[in-house]
């Protein structure tokens, strides 16, 4: 069995403590959340931090609340907490649908929403959800906090705009009254990363689509959104023809690679089909069906 290189361990007691440790230790340190991505990477020697700074003792990083017209989710909130959250489900069932198909209950007990976002895996389900909802990331460092749209948070596969000495502290999602949302995923077996996924929200008002968002995972290296497909839907009636045209546009925006999960053409076909299915369900939910 592979084992990580020797590593120092530090348990942070507050956000300020985590930041000051990470800043002092510099590029040789990494924060650790659930450890479900970082530890395997350390075992494979793809990551070799000299010190890991554990965020699990920072209570203020965990929790889900409504603040004004936003849903606020702390970075250390676990997948299990997101899955069971009544507040998130009330506004965006997409969270529960995505969490149901992320890994397994053991991973979901310790794996976190912040770790998922910061791992920046192109197949990350919650990155697709966050992009669909046009959420924001709050990143905190010694000079304060900055807010970055989630559509600009990822800087390539396994890269984000979080700098050394900073941590992701919160995710914020705008509440949209009347929104319907849905998540679709094809996986090779239960709990696996997606072959392709698509998540959407839609607001239908006065017979037309007045707001929408489309997020896809496993089909692009460095982003999860499909803005051209969204533009096709805005101001249009949610007819089958219009939804199908947007789904086809989403597939055109997908740039999948062939890998062990399937050929590129198959994934592009899934991008269209899953987006169409998600759009149909989100439209029905927004119309109160
Ligand atoms: C068997 C298995 C199956 C899985 N299947 C899926 C799946 O189907 N879909 C899916 O989306 N995911 C899947 N995952 C990944 C899972 O969602 C992990 O929980 C997630 O990738 C990482 O979360 P974590 O809390 O464990 O982060 P960690 O592993 O602790 O950290 C991941 C990275 O983020 C950094 N980091 C963590 N928190 C912060 C922070 N607050 N600020 C700055 N940097 C931070 C770390 O330094 C590290 O670089 C799977 C994982 C496993 C083990």
Image (cartoon, grey):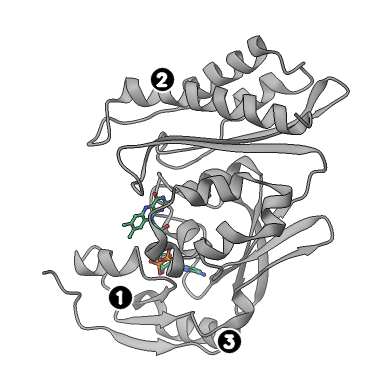
User: Mark 2 against mark 3, which lies toward the viewer?
Assistant: 2
> Does the numbered disc 1 mark a residue whose Cβ is under 8 Å from ligand 1?
yes
- Please give the name of the residue rendered at 58% of the width and 50% of the height, measured from the top-left corner: 96
Q: Which residue is mark 3?
A: 14
Q: Callout 2: few (<14), some (14-19), or many (20+) C-alpha neighbours within 10 Å?
A: some
Q: Are marks 2 and 3 in contact (CB under 8 Å)?
A: no
Which picture quadrant has residue 60? bottom right
- Give x and y (percent) for residue 195: 35, 35
Real-space CA distance between mark 2 and mark 3, rounded to the nearest whole angstrom: 46 Å
Upstream in sequence: badge 1 or badge 3: 3
Q: Is residue 199 left or right of residue 92?
A: left
Q: Are marks 1 and 3 in contact (CB under 8 Å)?
A: no
User: Mark 2 against mark 1, which lies toward the viewer?
Assistant: 2
Q: Which residue is mark 2?
A: 269
Upstream in sequence: badge 2 or badge 1: 1
> Does the numbered disc 3 mark a residue whose Cβ is under 8 Å from ligand 1?
no
Closer to us: 27 or 130? 130
Closer to us: 115 or 166? 115
- Give x and y (percent) for residue 286: 76, 32
Image: 230 above or below 32: above
Which picture quadrant has residue 133? top right
Q: Callout 1: few (<14), some (14-19), or many (20+) C-alpha neighbours within 10 Å?
A: many
- Please give the name of the residue rendered at 77% of the width and 49% of the height, measured from the top-left corner: 175
Q: Is residue 16 left or right of residue 111?
A: right
Q: Secondary structure at mark 3?
A: loop
Which picture quadrant has residue 52? bottom left
Q: Secondary structure at mark 2?
A: helix
Q: Residue furthest left?
A: 1
Q: Quadrant of ligand 1?
A: bottom left
- Please give the name of the residue rendered at 26% of the width and 65% of the height, measured from the top-left corner: 40
Q: Which residue is mark 1?
A: 49
């Amino acid at each position: 069995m592979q084992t990580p290189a020797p590593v120092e361990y530090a348990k942070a007691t507050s956000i300020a403590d985590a930041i000051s440790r990470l800043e002092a230790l510099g590029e040789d340190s990494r924060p650790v959340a659930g450890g479900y991505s970082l530890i395997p990477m350390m075992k494979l020697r793809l990551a070799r931090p000299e010190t890991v700074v554990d965020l699990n003792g920072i209570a203020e990083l965990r929790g889900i609340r409504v603040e004004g017209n936003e849903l606020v989710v702390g970075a250390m909130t676990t997948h299990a907490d997101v899955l069971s959250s009544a507040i998130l489900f009330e506004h965006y069932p997409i969270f529960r649908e995505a969490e149901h198909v992320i890994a397994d209950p053991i991973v979901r007990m310790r794996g976190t929403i912040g770790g998922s976002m910061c791992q920046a895996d192109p197949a990350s389900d919650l990155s697709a959800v966050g992009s669909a909802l046009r959420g924001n990331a709050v990143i905190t460092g010694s000079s304060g906090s900055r807010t970055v749209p989630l559509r600009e948070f990822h800087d390539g596969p396994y890269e984000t705009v979080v700098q050394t000495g900073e941590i992701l502290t919160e995710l914020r999602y705008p509440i949209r009254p009347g929104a319907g949302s849905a998540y679709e995923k094809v996986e090779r077996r239960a709990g696996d990363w997606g072959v392709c996924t698509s998540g959407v929200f839609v607001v239908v008002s006065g017979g037309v689509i007045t707001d929408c968002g489309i997020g896809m995972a496993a089909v692009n290296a460095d982003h999860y959104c499909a803005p051209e497909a969204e533009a096709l839907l805005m101001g249009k009636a949610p007819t089958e023809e219009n939804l199908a045209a947007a789904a086809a546009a989403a597939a055109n925006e997908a740039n999948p690679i062939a890998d062990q999960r399937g050929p590129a053409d198959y994934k592009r076909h899934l991008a269209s089909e899953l987006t169409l299915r998600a759009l149909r369900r989100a439209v029905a939910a927004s119309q109160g069906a």
